[in-house]
Amino acid sequence: MRNLKIIALLLLPLLGCFAQIEDQSVALSHNLCGGATNCMPGALPLGLIQISGQNTFTVNFGDQPLLQPSSSLGPATLNTSLILNGAGVRLQSSASGDFKNVATISLLAAPAATTDCSASGSNCTVLADYDRNRDGTADQSIALRGHDVDLISYISTTSHSVQLQFQATGTGPGNTWNADVSMDMALKARANFP
């Protein structure tokens, strides 16, 4: 009889209910210059890539209850992760040139719009990167390898956006340019009911 009670106590947590949403490939894209206009100067040595004079660019995720690390929805507790699988940068026009002279590029989460992630103590996190020696020479697009970072902790709970920044080495495209940035993410949200 005592063994039956112990087994029942061990199995009790397994009887809890939950619902889970999982998608291994959620895509989001963002135009660096905000449209068809080229805002990036051509043939310049790369470092901190400023977009229209700003250190960062903002990606808005919208006001979604899913996009918080943990939240309560009625009697349920919702836990979410949004892991960055990888990212891409694609030139909007081939007339701008190419990315063949880009040696490295990193996509970073920045704590504020004015942050320079190359500065010591900037508290930026590398989300994805490209290295020509490791990944091969890029042409019209660059594929960045994800670092399995959970973006949820970088999305602002008030603005529902994340501040991103590019740091690169090498030389940019020969003419003024614009690019589309894409991010591929894995979403997992689990609601636990009492």
Image (cartoon, grey):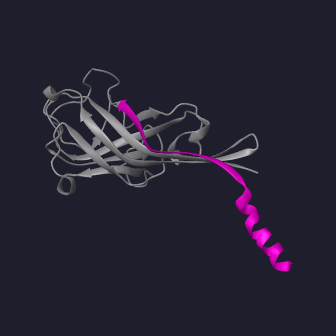
Name which quarter of the figure residue 175 lies in.
top left
At x 27%, y 20%, the residue is: 37
Stretch in magenta: 1-30
Taking depth in this image into account, of 75 and 8 the one nearest to the observer is 8
- Horizontally, is 179 left or right of 28 in the view? left
Total numbered circles: 0
Residue 113 locus on image (x, y percent)? 44, 37
Establish if 20 lies above or below 38.
Answer: below
Residue 124 locus on image (x, y percent)? 42, 50
Instruction: Say which quadrant the N terminus sits in.
Output: bottom right
**Residue 2 located within the stretch drawn in magenta:** yes
- Horizontally, is 25 left or right of 14 in the view? left
Q: Which residue appears farthest toward the bottom when viewing the image?
A: 2
**Residue 34 located within the stretch drawn in magenta:** no
Residue 72 locus on image (x, y percent)? 70, 43
Name which quarter of the figure residue 120 lies in.
bottom left
Q: Which residue appears farthest toward the right when viewing the image?
A: 1
Establish if 123 lies above or below 46.
Answer: below
Establish if 107 lies above or below 5.
Answer: above
At x 17%, y 40%, the residue is: 99
At x 33%, y 35%, the residue is: 181
